[in-house]
Structure formats: C-alpha cells, structure tokens
Image: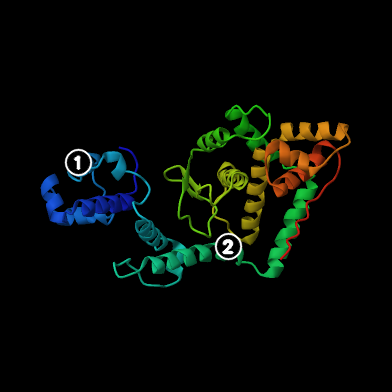
Amino acid sequence: MPAFDPVVLGHRVRHARKHQGLTLDQLGTLVAKPGPYLSLVETGKREPKLSLIAEIATALKTDLATLLDPEPPTPRARLEVALGRIQEEALYSELGLPHLKATASMSDNALGHIVTLYDALVRKTLGEVATPEEARKAAVEIKKHSRSLGNFHADIEAVATEALEAIGYSGAGALSQRDMIELASHFGFSLHTVQDFPPTARAIADKKNGRLFIPQRDELRTRQARYVIAQTLGHVALGHRRPSDYLDFFRQRIQANYFSSALLIPNAAGAQCLFDSKRRRDLAVEDLKERFYTSYETAAHRFTNLATKHLDIPVHLLRVDHK
C-alpha cells in the first residue's frame, strides 16, 4: 500500500463529499460504513485500507489518485493541516497553550496569522538561543576553522563530487533543471513547486514521503531556486540533525551553504574555469557567475574556495549588506 498522509486524505474526502452534496451517512450507505467511522477518516484519526479508499473515490465520482494526492485540496485545508502539525511539535507544547481547533468560525486570515507566526517563532528560536557574545564567538570559531583548511572543505567537496558523478554531470557549465531533479532523486526526494508558500520558509523537506517543496517560479527565480534546492539537499547529504546549540546550528548552515556552492560550481570544472581566466590575465568572480549561472554571492563564495586551494591566492569573503 502506498504511503499517504491520513490527515490530508481526510481533507480530500471531505472536500469531494461536500462537492457531491452528500452527508456522512449518505456516503456511508454507498460504501457500507457507518457515518461516525467516516467522520474519523475525515479528521485523520482513522487510516482506512486502500480498498475502502478506492470505494470512497468511486462513490464520490473521483479517482484514487486524487484522494491520495499529498497536497491539501484547498488553501483553507492547507492551513488547517499546518495548524494540526504545529500542535504536535515539542516547541508548541513548551508554550503551555491549550489545543486549538480550526473551527468553521475561524477565518482563513486568522489561521494564516497563526501558522506564519509559529513558523517565525521556530526560525527565531534557533537564531536567538545564543547571546550576541555567544554568536560572535561561534562565528569566530567557525571562521578560524575554515581558514585552517584554506577555505577548502575537502570532506564536503567529496560528498558533492560523488553526487554529481552519480547523476552523470559532464562538468560543462551550469547544472540543468534535469540535473537538479536527478540530484534531488539521488538523495531520495522529488521536487515540487507550490503556490501559497509560507513566507518565512525558503524550502520544505518532507523526509517521510521524500518530497522537497519550493515556491513556484514567479516567487522564486531560477538562480535562487537552484541554490535553495542545493542548500536543502546539503543538510540531508551531510547528515545534519536538529542542532544541539547555536554553534551547531551555525556550523550546519555554513556547511549546507558550502555544499550548495560545491554543487552549483563543481570543484574540477570551477578550478579549470579559473585556470583558463588566469592564463588570460583576466581573473574575476564574474567568470564563475556567468559560466555556472549563479548569483554573484555564490560565485564569490566559491571563488574564495577555489582560488585559495588551486591558484595559491588566499582569498576571504566579506559580505556587506547595505540597509
């Protein structure tokens, strides 16, 4: 039996049932199940057999694939699913709040506010567990370690190179959309672009079902989308777990960023590009940016790794944000 989310299935059954104008008892008559049982199915508290789901699909004049679609059927359902999952997390329990049910009287706007605020809380909790002094010390320690390696993390390079070899990357220029799909598949994920993406998230990895969600193209442009995908895969490829403290959190972010750059501008291909530019006496970050179709920041980051390692030109990246 294929894996599916009982909560999302329940929403899809309810959506299809109401579309057909049926009550729970009427649907129960069609599939030989009592209304209270189907109510448990719709609330995600009972996981029905695949044969029953098929019968429900027939009764509701839809198909099995539609009911098993992992996406909630409506924006409202998406918010209700998110609210339910939020309340299962340890951080929510620590808040000491009572269970909140998404009733019909609760507006979509209120639900959206709750989900968005909680997402922001999760992100800020990791970023604010340290005092400014602890954060500064963590940054100094990580920078010191990176410089001791000559800005070149051979262990992360090896993981990125192995992944690229696994998909048969030729080394000729930028990774294609097909390459990104195959890289995701290599790490056990399929890629999905979705609308109404949480504004506080860049990507969402569903590890249980092997799905990686990113915003649709009009919200996340190609260069940024490729970087976000590679960065998210980095956490998986490098075996990251929930950070134990701020230093661990910061280290994981740095490692994932490095991995992303190592995928988008591979070691051998990137070094060859710089060698060619050096021979022409025309060495610049833009060489990497244009050849591998990345942002300037990604190219600059990669330049520090490759120039220091292969050209014997010690380079350090200093990012300055203008506000």
Looking at the image, tell me whether mark 1 or mark 2 is earlier in sequence order. Answer: 1
Cβ–Cβ under 8 Å for marks 1 and 2: no
Q: Which residue is mark 1?
A: 58
In this rendering, the count of numbered labels is: 2
The three-letter code of the residue at mark 1 reads: Thr
- Of the pair 122 and 278, the residue shown nearer to us: 278
In this rendering, is residue 251 above or below 94? above
In the rendered image, residue 307, in percent from the top left (x then y), is placed at: 81, 40
Callout 1: SS: helix
Q: Which residue is mark 2?
A: 126
Number of the front mark, 1 or 2? 1
Residue 155 in view of the camera: yes
Residue at (30%, 37%) from the top-left corner?
1
Quadrant location of residue 44?
bottom left
Tell me the quadrant of the picture where the C terminus can be found.
bottom right
Left or right: residue 272 versus residue 263 is right
Residue 41 in view of the camera: no
Left or right: residue 293 versus residue 96 is right
Callout 2: SS: helix
In this rendering, is residue 156 above or below 20? above
In the rendered image, residue 38, in percent from the top left (x then y), is placed at: 19, 53
